[in-house]
Amino acid sequence: MRIFLLLVFLCAPAMGHQFTPTYPEVFPSHLPGISKVTMELFNNRRDISYYTIGVFDTNWQMVPFATSGKVIKIAYLGRKTIDIYIRNTDLSKAVYICSKSRTLVGQKQVAIVSSKICSKLK
């Protein structure tokens, strides 16, 4: 049984989500003291509909940020543009912006593999 599961895992196509651009640029926002990064999330996983967003420093500690929602629902083959706002005082600490797939508690089908994709700020 273990060999069968290993073969299924190795032969299955690797499907994840896309989080672009890889090296996003930071722009001033319409608010004073706040900068904005625009990212695009594409869901090409049938088994996942929810993603979380996070901003991290070089030691993978969370950096404060704001967005329309830290948990984002995207349908299969859906695409969503996400604006991420970071205070200028925290901007020097921010290095990575990441998206991670999430499942809901009580979902009928549970994903076996979680995907996390990070982009590095310029």
Image (cartoon, rainbow, N blue to C red):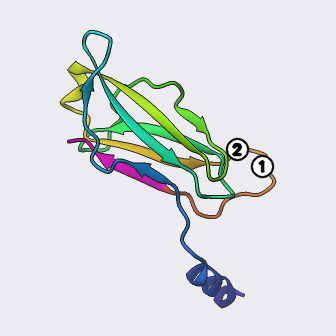
Name, please, the residue furthest toward the top.
Answer: 32
Label 2 packing within 10 angstroms: few (<14), some (14-19), many (20+): few
The spot of residue 65 in percent (x, y) is 38, 25
Q: Which residue is mark 2?
A: 104
Label 1 packing within 10 angstroms: few (<14), some (14-19), many (20+): few
Magenta range is: 116-122
- Residue at 56% over, 58% down: 114
User: What is the magenta segment's predominant secondary structure?
Assistant: strand
Relative to 28, residue 42 above or below: below
Between 29 and 98, the one nearer to me in the picture: 29
The spot of residue 106 in percent (x, y) is 79, 46
Relative to 38, residue 17 above or below: below
Relative to 48, residue 10 above or below: below
Between 3 and 97, the one nearer to me in the picture: 97
Q: As shown in the figure, which amino acid type bears the numbered disc 2?
A: Leu
Count of number-bearing discs:
2
Numbered tag placed on residue 5 in the rendering:
none
Helix, strand or loop for disc 1? loop
Q: Quadrant of residue 29?
A: top left
120 part of magenta stretch: yes
Name, please, the residue furthest toward the right.
Answer: 108
Q: Are marks 2 and 1 in contact (CB under 8 Å)?
A: yes
The spot of residue 62 in percent (x, y) is 36, 34
- Residue at 36% over, 36% down: 55
Quadrant position of the N terminus in the picture = bottom right
Position of 70 with respect to 89 (left or right) is right
Position of 9 with respect to 37 (left or right) is right
Between 1 and 70, the one nearer to me in the picture: 70
Q: Which residue is mark 1?
A: 107
Quadrant position of the C terminus in the picture = top left
Between 20 and 105, the one nearer to me in the picture: 20
Q: As shown in the figure, which amino acid type bears the numbered disc 1?
A: Gln
